[in-house]
Image (spheres, helix red, strand yellow):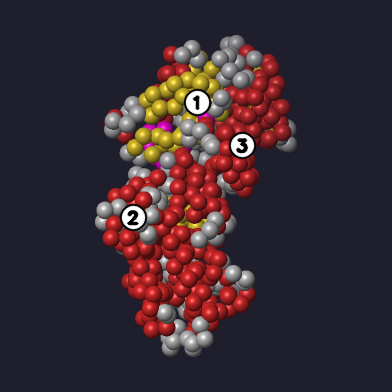
Amino acid sequence: MIRLEVKVKLPFLWGRAVFKKDIWSHINLIVGPNGSGKTLLAENIAGQFERSGYKVKFLRSDRSSSSEEFLILQNDAHIREKLQTVLSNMFGKSIVFKQKPDGDYVPVVVNKAWNVEYDLQQVECHGLKEIITLLVQLYANHGNACVIFDEPELHLHPQFQQFFMEELRKVSGRHPTRIYFLITHSPFFIDLRAPEELLGVVACHVNREPTHIAELSPEDSELFRKFLPRFNPYHKQFFFSDNQIFVEGYTDQQIFTNLLPFIGKEYASAGTGIIDVGGKDELGVFCKVCSLLGTNGKIITDLDSLFSGKLRDVFCRDKSAQEWLLKQQEKQAHFYESIFSARELKRQVTLESLILRLEKFLSEIGKEICQSDKSPPKGAELFFERLLMINEKHEKAETIDTFKTVVLQGITACEKELQDFLMPQSARSLPLVKNLFALILAATEAAGVYILPDGCIEHYYTQNKIEYMPVAAKDRLFHTELEYIRNLSPQEAENKYGDIITILGRACVKNSR
């Protein structure tokens, strides 16, 4: 790590806010959407490094001539030999410099496969020229330097991007006094292998100042150490957008992606992508990264995420959720008195405490239903059947996430029937449960987490009626539903999927958290 205090003000981009950062990695990444000021930020950072004694080399994205690099190749035999070895392995080609009658040197490509030679400046493809330019500047002796590569991915195949990043790591390791910056839109340069490398990421945003992670707690470091090996280029899209939406699996991703065009406000989803992360716990990690990095990543998740897992831990600690609840304190005072004791209200009401109280209500109501000798009320037979099945399968079923989820689904769908079935005290708690659930959903939404109130994506399907959890034969149900959605008109989509489209539309709103 390199310590140098940097302060940048760009009022026309982010008003009165000031970007501040004083700890830098040897390799730093400046990322974000188009128009967020990445290059302007880099120019200001470069100027402050230069005033601190660093020699700055800024390789801009509009680089059109490689004359400087060819001069380095011509005069530095070591770099020339190294590059010739690299190119021979990459392309089956090598470069030689041939002297013209006027004394100048012409870079010539020797294609060994066909035993032909040609002038690189006049004939060769952009990709080969680009990798030569990048590698020459990387290998060149810049001394105590700050080297900035603006969009190094230009004209480069992903494999060559990965190769350049590997070379950058090697060179950086041999020159600890140098510092490198990559201004990039490519996920292949988000090559994070250790948690501390997240400290070298600067995220730029539209209409607000850039953000970064100042430090990682031991808990966060351990979380990311286990996660980073599973962090693939597809996942890394969120570094380049202020409005990515993460979902648990590929079925959610496909359904939401195909419903995006039906959001009511035209172009509301522009710049939004849906990324599946491959698991519920991974959602918690992405939520944590977005929170720390200051990006507006959103999450749409199943109802059972309320009751356990990394995601719950993250949104319960999210400052935006807590700030929202603080604003509700006076408005909800009477409601809090109906669900908490006077002693409990001496402590601050948090999202965690609200969820714990919801769980208590659900466990007690579920236990009462399972222990009752009465027949299920008409209209609630399937709910009772599903709940009793879970109860028989698990010891202390009331502690199981699925059990609590099904009770909550049952209260939502069968409140009237349950009013006559339950003991009076439990019956009186049903409206409290519904109000508490609505409050929790609003608080998690303030944290950028949108919980599906009906359960999971399958509960919004229209081609098969799905009630309660767990859901069987998900893959078959998914393909039937997806085929149907792809043939809908906008009006049909709104009529059939209005609830889920509304949730998706709220998640697409671009805000500054």
Mark 1 crowdedness (10 Å alpha carbons): few <14, some 14-19, many ≥20 = some
Q: Position of residue 296 (x, y in %)?
A: 41, 46
Which quadrant: the C terminus?
A: top left
Which amino acid type is shown beneath numbered disc 3?
A: Ala
Query: Which stretch is magenta?
Result: 28-38
Q: Nearer the viewer, residue 235 or 100?
A: 235
Instruction: Kindly indicate the quadrant of the structure image that contains residue 88.
Output: top right
Q: Name which residue lies at 68% across and 35% down.
A: 90
> Measured along the vertical axis of the image, is residue 137 above or below residue 419?
above
The dot on residue 23 is 1
Which amino acid type is shown beneath numbered disc 1?
A: Ile
Q: Position of residue 208 (x, y in %)?
A: 34, 37
Mark 2 crowdedness (10 Å alpha carbons): few <14, some 14-19, many ≥20 = some
Q: Position of residue 105 (x, y in %)?
A: 61, 16
Residue 332 in sight from this viewpoint: yes
Q: Nearer the viewer, mark 2 or mark 3?
A: 3
